[in-house]
Amino acid sequence: MTVMASASSSRQTQMNARIDAALKEAGDTVLGNLGYTPSMAVRGFWRFIVNHQDDAAAVREIIEPAVATELSAEAARKMSATSRLRSLYEQTAAELGIDGEDASILPSWDELRDAWYSERLGGDA
């Protein structure tokens, strides 16, 4: 479900959030130095979330950078494993003389399964 946000709305709502006092004070100082108010920062953050609603990683990176880094490391590990698997497939295909460009000569999963059963059961699959 895509949520839309209007740029300007006459109806506003107030939010109350609990935040560490020292963090609030430090944040207010930084925002003030940059020319922003806390309300402007919250509106900007909410706008960011709505604009990136289909990009959980981008939102997670803002809210929980440490968790996002852990997930990025996990994604990198999975990508590396996939890459290794692809390389192994290409190597095996080359050793078997299967041209990587012509996937039509590769057996389907059903054909592979039937061949496996046939081999195991002595041709009576």
Image (cartoon, rainbow, N blue to C red):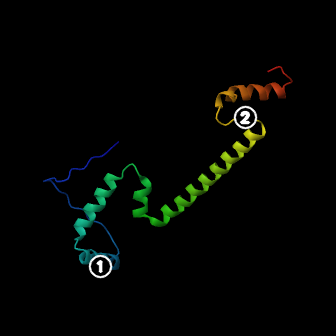
Quarter of the figure with the C terminus: top right
Q: Quadrant of residue 112?
A: top right
Q: Residue furthest right?
A: 122
Q: Disc 2 on helix, strand or loop? A: loop
Q: Amino acid at mark 2?
A: Ile
Task: Give the mark count.
Answer: 2
Q: Residues within 10 Å of mark 1 (few under 14, many from 20)?
A: few
Give the distance between the C-alpha atoms of the residues marked 2 and 1, in whole angstroms: 66 Å
Residue at the spot x=27%, y=74% of the render?
A: 31
Give me the disc on residue 99.
none
Residue at the spot x=73%, y=28% of the render?
A: 113
Residue at the spot x=49%, y=66% of the render?
A: 66
Residue at the spot x=36%, y=53% of the render?
A: 52
Quarter of the figure with the N terminus: top left
Give me the disc on residue 98.
2
Q: Disc 1 on helix, strand or loop? A: helix
Q: x, y percentage for residue 68?
A: 48, 61
Q: Is residue 94 depicted above or below 37 in this figure?
A: above
Q: x, y percentage for residue 119?
A: 83, 27
Instruction: Looking at the picture, tell me which residue is in the foreground, 95 or 106.
Output: 95
Q: Is residue 16 depicted above or below 104 in this figure?
A: below
Q: Earlier in the sequence, mark 2 or mark 1?
A: 1
Image check: 91 left or right of 80?
A: right
- Mark 1 lies on residue: 25
Q: Are marks 2 and 1 in contact (CB under 8 Å)?
A: no
Q: Is residue 40 depicted above or below 56 in this figure?
A: below
Q: Quadrant of residue 57?
A: bottom left
Q: x, y percentage for residue 11?
A: 15, 53
Image check: 113 left or right of 12?
A: right
Q: Amino acid at mark 1?
A: Glu
Image check: 96 left or right of 56?
A: right
